[in-house]
Image: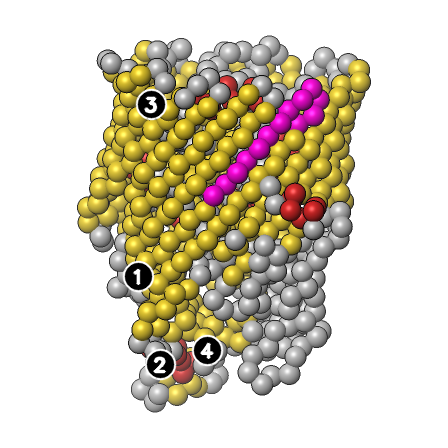
Amino acid sequence: MAMLCLSLFASGQTIDRIDSLSEVVVTGTGTHHVLKDVPVQTEVIGQRMLRNFSGKSIEEILSSLTASFSFSEDDMGSQMQMNGLGNSYILVLVDGKRIHGDVGGQNDLSLIDPHNIDKIEIVKGASSALYGSDAIAGVINIITKNRRQEGLLLENTTRIGSYGDVRQHDAVGFRAGKFSSLTNFQLQHSDGWQNTGTEHTVGTEPPIYDSRNKTVNRHTNWQVAQRFSYKFSDRFEMYADGSIYRKRIYRPSGKYPHYDVKTWDMEYRNASASVGGTWRLSGSDYLQLDVDWNRHAYYYDFTATTLVEDYDKSAGTIYYPYYPYLPGQRELQSDQQRTMAQLKGVFSLPHDNRLNVGAEYRYDWLKAPTRVAGGKAHDTTQSLYVQDEWNPLPALNITAGVRLNNNSSFGFRLTPKVSTMLKLSRDIRLRASWSQGFKTPAIRELYYRYVRQMSGTYLYLGNENLKPQSSNYYSLSAEYTSGAFSITVSGYYNNLDNMIALVTIPNYQAPADYILQYDPVKTRQYQNIETAKTYGADINVRYAWREFTAGLGYSYLDTRANQYDTTHDKMKKVTIDGMAHHKGNVFVMWGHRFSDTYRLGVGVYGRMSSKRYYQTDGNGKGYQTWRITTSHDIGKSKHCDYRLELGIDNIFDYVDRTPHGLHLGTTTPGRTVYATFSIKFHKGNKISNKFKSNNYQKQNTNEED
């Protein structure tokens, strides 16, 4: 019990050394600030922590190194939750740009190569004034490495682990004068695993104990990305980049209809292209333009003959034969494309003011022949924003901003934000924020009609009568830092109006042809919940002494929502799906350089969660897991660096054996081991480069000792 109580203090607040408080962050205000002086509370997972932890994925990194996140991964992507709100309320950025890969509401975070990350910045709460729709729960900004190397750079990292886990990263970089190029390749593969063969059944059906369903299916994904940049002068730089991505999920086929009979695999095909540039005007003033196109396509690849039931509306009956799909055939499920243009300017003004202004255009297009009425849908949004940072006193910063949003379906909306930071002394800082969030319904929430075979047939419906969601977010935090010790205590309250959630409705309220065709066990529809509230508190403690660094933290969360009960014609209070009252993690790191050619690093990490609550299909069990990592920097030469990493995850072999079809606390397969070997070749001189073309500074990057 003592161990559990200790482990409930989880670390997420700036996990590197105390002097990392002087590093530059950008996400909270969209402008550059030293971390200790940023007016918006920001958490940072720095380079040193990332290297020591050796995470294989973004999901593993975030869930283990901060207390605010939880994940429920499945074939559709990463079902992420942050402070009580799910994927669609969390904005994920890479170098300040939105990622694109939303299928069924879950972002596919495997689009992000963990070996290419310099640091991660996390801002909690509504940030719609600065970032627009989706930023209601918070913002995660993945900042990639800036290879400041004149000449040639070659990187290779190979990781192998239990259950056929393979992770491969390769990079080729070249910089000559004003021109630079970087090619990045990543591959991820897992054989998957099965924690239980028991299948949850419905009604009077007998239990199934030999299901072939896996907890995590075998999957392979790879990505190739290319970036070119040209620095015309010290003030003006342009870039062009693009990527292609493929993912295949292999689903086993069993003998039980509606439970483990799988006749198709899933495939994802992504592509992206971007151009842009940054023009530095004077000092810290600049203009920045980015134009992006992204595509995310999702297919069924049939592995067996599949017979599809069809409904004869004139006769009012289901008829046979069907329209068969044969092995080798492919069917498009959804093709989501997005085009965005963003113009941003940052200007210093008299009387200690700093102005951040911008404009954005966004066009979303969806093609889903089997999932959207009419097969296609689209949406456009234009917005303008302005933000002013004012320092009326040396110890006081006030930042205020507002965004004017115009959506083609829902019209105009203003979203303001005000944040302030007060330095009570050299060691004590207070921060307070109030911000509004705004989110228009996603295309899938409006128009989707989707049938899912799980423990029976489930029907998911869009709703064209949805209203936009809005929120009011309040936060207050206090930070104390003295020498090697740092503690931050923060509280927040988020009030959402018209929150959109999947609600179980009586089958008779669904379209008649779908009921006759599929005879669903449950029908769920996107609906506006009248009100929803999330509130909680975070405590983060950190201490660094010589070669040791340790961190503790704790996150408390509670949620309340009012939902209309169509069956009983009354309002009822419910808990937001996935909520856990208590989450946390803890870490201790030690590192020592024994010689010029060998450095050893050792880390112990724990993460834990109390029970997660759901309205249907059971609750997720509470759990705690522990991990040990070792890193070995060996044989350093003039042009090559070598690194070996060895580790054990889930040391005490915890496995959640909840039957398939019900919610899990964690999907871990139990104790796993891994080994990673990296080699980096660099030939040339390091150069100073304050600005990447996307204007993300790499000052004060924490390097390994």
| Numbered label attached to residue 520 | 4
Q: Which residue lies under the disc numbered 1?
A: 530
Q: Which residues are magenta?
A: 537-549
Check disc 3 and give the amino acid type.
Answer: Asn
Q: Closer to the observer: label 1 or label 4?
A: 1
- CA gap, disc 4 to disc 3? 56 Å
Q: Quadrant of residue 460?
A: bottom left
Label 3 packing within 10 angstroms: few (<14), some (14-19), many (20+): many
Compute the Cα span from label 2 to label 4: 11 Å
**Res 397 label:** 3
In primary-sequence order, the first of circles 3 and 1 is: 3
User: Is 542 colored magenta in this rendering?
Assistant: yes
Identify the residue at horizontal 62%, vertical 27% (top origin). Answer: 543
Of 146 and 703, nearer the camera is 703
> Does 627 appear above or below 378?
above
Where residue 604 sits in the image (x, y, percent)?
A: 71, 37
Would you place residue 66 above or below residue 431 in this image? below
Decide: few, some or many residues near mark 2? Use Cα within 10 Å; few <14, some 14-19, many ≥20.
Answer: few
Measured in 3D between alpha carbons, the distance from the residue under mark 1 to the one under mark 2, in whole angstroms, is 23 Å
Main secondary structure found in the magenta portion: strand
Q: Earlier in the sequence, mark 4 or mark 3?
A: 3
